[in-house]
Amino acid sequence: VRDHYEYFDFIPRQNLEITREIKTIISGVASQLVLNLPTESLTFFEKIIIYPDYYQSRITNKLHKGEVNPGLRLIVLSWRGIVEGLNRPDDGLNLLLHEFAHALWLENKIMHQEYTLLNPALVVYYEQAASEEVIKMQNDDQHFFRKYALTNKEEFFAVAVENFFERPEGFKNAAPELYQTLVALFRQDLLTS
């Protein structure tokens, strides 16, 4: 947590005061995600911009809770979105986990020639399991994951990560093969820890 706390450049927007608490919460979730991954994990992204509330994205011109911009090497978050996710710790909606999952996925794709954050063979295995789960989701209105996961592969990964950390038991029951691929990718299993 200390490493992330000291590494990231936390940049406030709209007069938000970035307190030690805010920096610690954000750093803690980043550390939770990459706990057993190589130390280079989440080092491609250098800056974290934090708005007090949802914000108008300069890229999409839509209201956002968070986003990841690999071109500028930054992660953008809304404090309101963070708090909402943390106040409901078992609903599978967590802005920090979601955006850090995007950052990790993109960093792994961008930096794969310099270092490997996620085991390439396990990534292939994950993508196969995810594709099978997408088919199940398309045929099941009551699926464990929210429909937003069907947006694209990147959103599916981010939603899977949210559920992996927030609702591991339900995830394992609903999609055991996919759950086990994330256990292998992240080298951790919250159900046995």
Image (spheres, rainbow, N blue to C red):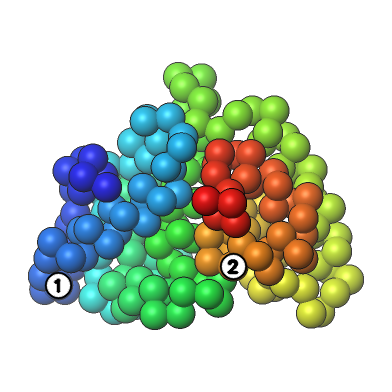
Would you call the spot at circle 1 few (<14 residues within 10 Å), some (14-19), or many (20 or more)?
Answer: few
- Write the residue at 43% across / 30% down: 38
To which quarter of the image does residue 137 belong?
Answer: bottom right
For residue 170, the mark is: none
Q: Position of residue 88 (x, y in %)?
A: 45, 79
Q: Is residue 10 visible to the viewer in this orientation of the structure?
A: yes
Residue at the right extreme of this rendering: 139
- Write the residue at 78% across / 50% down: 177
- Residue 47 versus residue 66 in the image, above or below: above
Secondary element at image label 2: loop
To which quarter of the image does residue 59 belong?
Answer: bottom left
Residue at label 1? 16
Q: Position of residue 107 (x, y in %)?
A: 46, 37
Q: Nearer the viewer, residue 47 or 192?
A: 192
Residue at the top extreme of this rendering: 114
Q: Position of residue 97 (x, y in %)?
A: 45, 59
Determine whether, in the image, residue 127 is placed left or right of residue 85: right
**Which of the two marks, 1 or 2, is nearer to us in this view?**
2
Q: Position of residue 192 (x, y in %)?
A: 59, 51
Residue at label 2? 167
- Write the residue at 37% across / 51% down: 30
* Dot placed on the residue nearer the N-terminal end, 1 or 2: 1
- Write the residue at 31% across / 55% down: 28
To which quarter of the image does residue 155 belong?
Answer: bottom right
Determine whether, in the image, residue 164 is placed left or right of residue 54: right
Q: CA distance from mark 1 to mark 2?
A: 31 Å
Amino acid bearing label 2: Arg
Determine whether, in the image, residue 10 is placed left or right of residue 56: left
Amino acid bearing label 1: Leu
Q: Is residue 59 visible to the viewer in this orientation of the structure?
A: no
